Image (cartoon, rainbow, N blue to C red):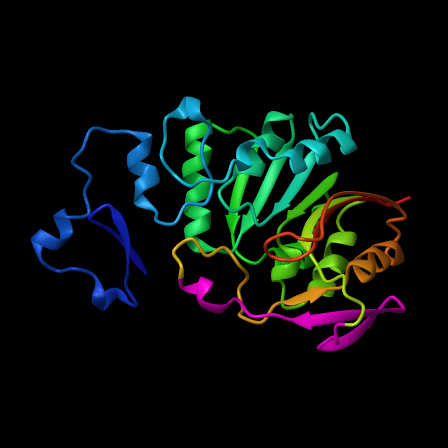
Amino acid sequence: MKLFTGGRLKKHKSAKDWPTTAQDLFASYEESFPSQQNAVDLIPGWSTAFPTEFALKAGNLPLFADARIHWAIEQFGDLKGSRVLELGPLEAAHTTMLNAAGAHVEAIEANKLGYLKCLISKEVYQLSNTRFYLGDFVQWLEKTDTTYDLIVASGVLYHMRDPLRLLQAMAKKTHTIYLWTVCVENDELEPTKIETINGVPARLYARHYGPGKESQSFCGGMVDRPYWMHRNDILAVLKSFGFSNITIAHEEPEHLHGPCFSIFAKAD
């Protein structure tokens, strides 16, 4: 459980940990002049910078004007009225861009603090036609009947404990996928294991987050042993699911976190 205490989220393991004194209870109220900055300050560890016109102090990354999402929208074409599923919206920056392009967006975030940040961003931007859900998006893909015109998965594949399962689940719910991911390009690097899907052998490389997972701004996956995929295997697996029309952009072999690229994939 979490309680809003002194302007920050305080973690409580069970109901017995909730404050019982009047002093503790009243500390959960905000006494300053009402503002959106109060809401932003409520959650620690923001990564995203809001546009300057909002005059809000949060993170530093300009993700509300991300060139990768602009490119994905250009590749898709007119998004007005389209149903879009976004996996791992972080702090709703990309969600906001998709919404501005006219899409009806459903976004699923597993990180609890990240989910709350999304709701704050939704309020800041007054987003309509947008719903946020808290939970595991793989289960959503596998257990719901909804299909989408586009699935956006920016910065999530390399955080997955089972990236092949995610690719398969996405392929069953859309004919168009946008991916941005970190990957492995070195053919000489020994994979942790090899798994075959649709007749395609996929090399998987175990990774660990290190001390970064202790940060309040941590935005990785749900387990400290995600598997990265080889770049060529990502493309081969997508093609095996029928996504034969593939466009690639934003290749950065020397990226801080590892080689990365964007994929816009369409099924025939």
In the rendered image, residue 35, in percent from the top left (x then y), is placed at 28, 29
Which image quarter holds the C terminus? top right
Residue visible at 64% across and 52% down? 255
In the rendered image, residue 221, in percent from the top left (x then y), is placed at 55, 61
Count the numbered circles shown.
0
Depth check: give the residue in front, 13 or 111: 111
- Which quarter of the picture shows residue 204? bottom right
Which image quarter holds the N terminus? bottom left
143 lies left or right of 217: right
228 lies left or right of 44: right
196 lies left or right of 43: right
Residue visible at 20% across and 39% down? 30
Most distant residue in the left direction: 22
Residue 172 in sight here: no
Range shown magenta: 189-214
Residue visible at 53% across and 64% down? 222
In the rendered image, residue 89, in percent from the top left (x then y), is placed at 55, 45
81 lies left or right of 196: left
- Which quarter of the picture shows residue 241? bottom right
Depth check: give the residue in front, 203 or 211: 211
Whether 56 is drawn above or below 113: the answer is above
Residue 30 in sight here: yes
- Tell me, yes or no, whether the highlighted magenta stretch contains residue 99: no
- Tell me, yes or no, whether the highlighted magenta stretch contains residue 195: yes
